[in-house]
Image: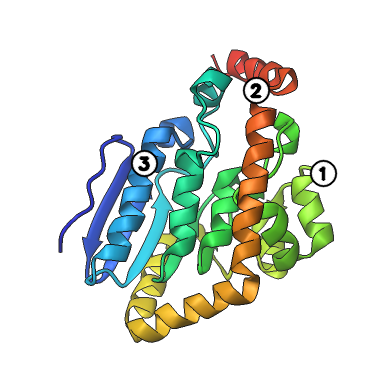
Amino acid sequence: MPQPEVDSGYIRAESRDGILRVTIDRADKRNALTAAMYDDMSRCVEHAGADDSVRTLLIDSEGDMFCAGNDVAEFAAATPENRTPGSAGPALSFIKRLRALDKPVVIAVQGQATGIGTTMLLHADLVIAGESARFFTAFIDLALVPEAGSSLLLPGLIGRQNAARLLLAGDTLESDEALRMGLIAYRVGDAELADKAMDLAKKLSAKPPEAIRQTKQLLREGLGNDDVDGQIEREAERFGERLFSDEVREIMNRFLKRSK
């Protein structure tokens, strides 16, 4: 099977037996995502959509933490001048491609899932998590606002009060809470997460592909596709404005000083 091209050095991709497995491999930086990593992941999603031999996309990560969200150092280095108005940027380009994919998406989560490490899950079809999984959006504590459609999708998925816990109070949800609320579909032991995630991907790959495609389309339409896309844009505009505020810069500088 042809393999997608990845260039960042921190994303691994392997297509085998109908499953494209995309692994975030930057454990020494808590799998924080950079623009180059998002570009790799976008190419992988595009590959999954274009290659008929791929039946399911599986996203996982190395180490004991699923994803720390966006790379704070890269965020802190951004300036209004190098931001293109109206551009989705690499992170939201990846989210939009993931959302549009007409093939099953499985995401396996272990340890902490922070920021987009949590909000990307809203665009998976099935999330399987280890017992150690913990979900934290982080936006409010960075003086930022939600992204990836989460301000619209989370209340519909887990209820307004639970969404407010994540987005306003900055609470962390443990894996048992996430399962009960419906943020994840399955909760398994950490030691069996990789095998169970692959079994789930194989199960989906064995389903009739056209029925899968049309079912995904119906599920998207039932959520109100236009509203979600519009919400992603509205959030992105506010997020970009907040990113360059003094409040956010002060918090990020403190974070970077602590991490040195």
Q: Which residue is mark 1?
A: 169
Q: Is residue 188 above or below residue 115?
A: below
Q: Amino acid at mark 3?
A: Asp
Q: How many marks?
A: 3
Q: Which badge, 2 or 1, comes first in the chain's sequence?
A: 1
Lower position in the chain sequence, tag 3 or tag 1: 3
Would you say the residues marked 3 and 2 are in contact, meaning their CB atoms lie under 8 Å apart?
no
Distance from label 3 to label 1 (Cα)? 32 Å
Quarter of the image where the N terminus is located: bottom left
> Could you say where residue 260 lies in the image, as x and y percent from the top left?
54, 14
Marks 3 and 2, Cα distance to the nearest angstrom? 23 Å
Instruction: Tell me the crowding category of disc 1: few under 14, some 14 to 19, or many 20 or more residues within 10 angstroms, Cα based.
Output: few
Q: Along the horizontal axis of the image, is 79 left or right of 250? A: left
Q: Which residue is mark 3?
A: 39
Q: Quadrant of residue 129?
A: bottom right
Please give the label number shown on residue 244. Answer: 2
Mark sitting earlier along the chain (3/2): 3
Residue 197, how many percent across, how many down? 42, 66
Residue ranking furthest to the front: 86
Residue drawn 44% across and 33% down?
Answer: 34
Q: Is residue 159 left or right of residue 59?
A: right
Image height check: is 74 above or below 186? above
